[in-house]
Image: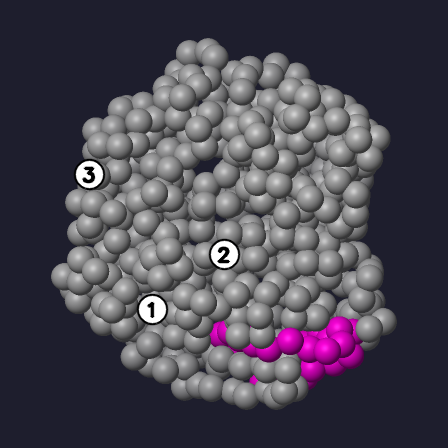
Amino acid sequence: MTLGYGKICWVDLSKKEVNYQPMDAALARKYIGGIGLATKILWDETTSQTEPFSPENLLIFMVGPLTGTFVPSSSRYVVVGISPLTDILGIAHAGGNWAYELKHAGFEGIVVRGKSEKPVYLWIHDNTVEIKDAQHVWGLDTYETSELLQKETDAKASVACIGPAGEKKVRISCIINDGRAGRAAARCGLGALMGDKKLKALVVRGTQSIEVADERGLRDVVKEIYEQSPPEKLEEVIDMQVNVLKRFIKIGAPIKNWLEGSFEEGNMIAEELRKTRPYHCRGCPYQDLESKLVDGGERHMVWEHWGPLGSNCLISDVESLQKAYSLCNRYGLDTISTGVVVAFAMECFEKGIITEKETGGIKLIWGDSKAMLEIIREIGERKGFGALLGEGVKRAAERIKGLAYEYAMHVKGLEIPAHDPRTHMTRALGYATGSIGAAHMETFPGDHIEGYIEDISQFTMPELGYTTRLDRLSTEGKAELVAKMQDYNSMLDSLVVCIFSALRIKPSQFVRLLNNIIGWDMDLSDFMLAGERIFNLKRMFNVRRGISRKDDTLPPRLLTHKRPGHGFGVPFLGAILSEYYMYRGWSEEGIPTKKKLKELGLEECLQFSPF
């Protein structure tokens, strides 16, 4: 067994078989863990013809080498598979308790293939995975499921499950863990993939210890991190949250389906964040931008929920937003995609492209919270007009036809998150070239280097060559910045740490943490090379499924319509896309060249690159 790593468990639901494999040391060194290792497994086990809703598609839950240790920000897991929403690589992340429990149960990952004839769940405990009947929880929402399965297994277990939306294969459905805490592996519709396999939940409880190569060295690095970035007081966190949210509302929030430039009512939403209490992932002292409103019991919301469901639909009624968020969690719906498809439908309704005849009598009027809640229920239950919206905004626009396509805000089929790419070039190029579509964290913290959160964050990354701020609307230097941030984040996602840790932990410290846990002698250049390898593997996975330059773009509105107000631009992707490809060693069509693939040791990908 490789130090710092657990076993990989392979579960075949068609055959009702469970097998265990020790971690391969060479594979771990090359792909690290998390997204890197999961993408490699998915590459090896699927083809360009594998359909998302087929027994051959895999559903992979993976943690990383830092998971389960006392390293801050390390209690996260990733879910990977061919996305039912986009038909390309699907990736989702979540925090909470689930990852910690999985690692302490002795596992690095759970790889699920096949389909069960009847609903089942996996009961994962120390070195053991069992397939259990789940017919009694099929149909329950995520909160009910979590509570019942904890009673059935272990009160300290963590439950990752789907709700009715995932069961009905709603393509914007997600996976919720930790019940009312509402942690979500949200993006890419992987809840639908879980539902297609009739897999209701993965319940995990671990009590084993984790052996590391140099515990004293590890503690020294962690102590150093806490000394340079001590956990903030609650009052400081709240002030930061309020100020950041107000900044987003002023410059960058999605407003009226990305059509308008201001939404002053949103400041009321920001002030609601003062009704907070601490909310942490397992073993992490930092709170970042996540808090839990105290008077609702399940009111844990962040900007990625407020924006799409709130300002994007012109809704500022906080109570209704909380209800919308709760509905999404209970049904198991991605709040980003849900908010985007509802705003899309509201614009189509306003323009007369759809009427009450199509919506079943629901008046989808801007700012109507009652209508929003009603259509969310239909999406979650896959009925009425909600059944169409639950297919995602790209498919919905294709079905509605006409000008609906102009209002469909997505990249590669994935709905755009709550940050307008017209506010800074890093976001625009990052959305366009993202490995799952419009991924808002894949270029983080590049937006901080651009001063997106000016006067709040004075962030730089000298170890990666960034000692001063960059002009956020300029294209100068942005091709290199985006590529570096994508490579860096590919490593963080393979370590499986919270992306906000990049604001507190230096790149060289991540290298030292990894070396102390595994016993490697990696340096920063090795670290970044591994990140580049992993990002290129993700790209080649999508190339194998037909992705090229034609898909590296933004919705027409964001390329042609200047957002009202100051501090906005219209991104021109032509020249900078070519510059980005050149920096990456890709062809003009956006395909990694054979030379680049050989440099990265990705020989298995060579046959899929004609360049």
Which callout, 3 or 1, points at the residue further toward the start of the chain? 1
The residue stretch that appears in magenta: 105-134
Q: How crowded is mark 3: few (under 14 residues within 10 Å), some or many (20 or more)?
A: some
Q: What residue is shown with label 2?
A: 87
Contact check, label 2 and label 3, Cβ < 8 Å: no
Determine if residue 109 is in view.
Answer: yes
Residue 195 in the image: x percent, y percent? 68, 64
Extreme-top residue of the structure = 565
Q: Distance between the residues labelled 2 and 3?
A: 27 Å
Q: Is the magenta stretch mostly helix, strand or loop?
A: strand
Where residue 213 appears, x then y in whole percent? 35, 77
Report the mark closest to the observer, 1 or 2.
2
User: Of the numbered discs in the image, which one, if any, rests on residue 579?
Assistant: 3
Along the line of sight, which residue is nearer the eye, 271 or 471?
A: 471
- Mark 1 = which residue? 31
- Residue placed at 30% from the left, 36% from the top? 460
Residue 112 in magenta stretch? yes
Q: In this view, does 158 lie to the left or right of 425?
A: right
Q: In this view, does 231 lie to the left or right of 16?
A: left
Classify mark 1: residues with Cα within 10 Å, few (<14), some (14-19) or many (20+): many
Left or right side of 400 for 441: left
Inspect the image, locate mark 3, and give the three-letter code of the amino acid beneath it. Glu
